Image: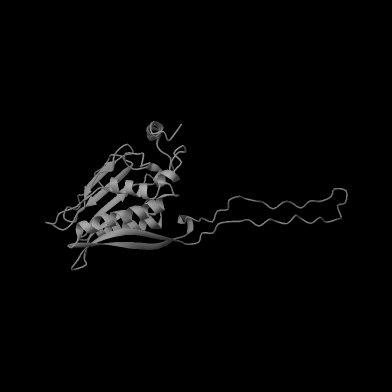
Amino acid sequence: MPNPFPGMNPYLESPDFWPQVHHLLISSIFESLVPQLLPRYIVDIEKRVYEISGENSLLVGIPDVTVQRSPIQTNPTSSNIAVAAPPVTALKVRLPVPVEFREAYLEVRDTETRAVVTVIEVLSPANKRPGKGREMYEQKRERVFGSRTHLVEIDLLRSYQPLPVFGNDIEASYRILVSRRDCRPMADLYLFNLPDMIPQFPLPLRAGDVEPIVDLQALLNGVYDRAAYDFRIDYTAEPVPPLSEADAAWADSLLRDKGLRG
């Protein structure tokens, strides 16, 4: 069965699925762009590697349970006889060890000079979650904004605060930002919600070159089919993270109409 949602499938945002979805979507964008951009441009898959530790780590040193030592037991009729305390059970705890993140993104380069023309980012939770991951991504974002490189930023995650832009007071679950180097500080922001199809957008290139249209909806649906998410997702359960009340009611009606809920 194909993706039952007309646009973004909120079940793909689950931590169980998103790392693979992110990887496959980056690969799909890469495969779709390469034949359209040759021979003028090449496309590279790059990786950003960093570590997060302490409170911002996924492994936080907080024990699952708290156990207190049992008090010493004494025999009231034989107060001169010492009774050994029961042994203390060792706890299994998680330590704040550094967690290594590897995030893929795309760079469109001039074939002759190898200069980066466009950066394409598909955001991960680490890019949006408060902490080192977001700080590092925002620093890179600012560097791109101060350069001669275009930026395409794709946010298909409802969790955490969106990356900052000015001049937008419309709330939306998902967004695509297309920042052209010659138009800054202005940029194009595509906003869409759960019932909407993912909008198509032009990939910014150098002046005078034909810009391919990125059909992210078709690419995401292809990922859904190839990875057989229809066999993996339990549509009788609620998605993680949970939907708003209005979106949950809409999704429930949709899934019932498609026979995926009783």
The reply to whether residue 143 is in sight is no
What number of labels is visible?
Answer: 0
Front-lying residue, 3 or 137: 3
Locate residue 262 relative to residue 75 in the image: left or right: left
Relative to residue 172, is residue 207 depicted above or below? Answer: below
From the top left corner, tell me how far across and down residue 214 is, in percent: 24, 50
- Would you say 131 lies left or right of 37 here? right
Quadrant of the rendered image containing residue 210? bottom left
Quarter of the image that includes the N terminus: top left
Instruction: Using the rendered image of the protein, determine whether residue 121 is visible from the camera's viewpoint.
Output: yes
**Residue lying farthest to the front in this orientation:** 1
Q: Is residue 71 left or right of residue 184?
A: right
Q: Is residue 163 or residue 243 the one in the foreground?
A: 243
Q: Looking at the rendering, which quadrant does residue 142 occupy?
A: bottom left
Q: Is residue 84 above or below residue 197?
A: below
Looking at this view, name the residue that lies furthest to the bottom: 113
Residue at image coords 36%, 47%: 225
Residue that appears at 26% across and 54% down: 32
Q: Residue furthest left?
A: 208
- Which percent across, then down, holds residue 140? 30, 59
Furthest residue toward right: 77
Residue 75 spot, x, y in % from top left: 84, 50
Q: Position of residue 37 (x, y in %)?
A: 20, 58
Q: Residue at x 37, y 59 (%)?
A: 103
Question: Toward which corner of the image does residue 194 lie, by quadrant?
Answer: top left
Front residue of 221/174: it is: 221
- The residue lying at 33 percent from left, 46 percent from top is 221
Above-or-below relation of 216 to 96? above
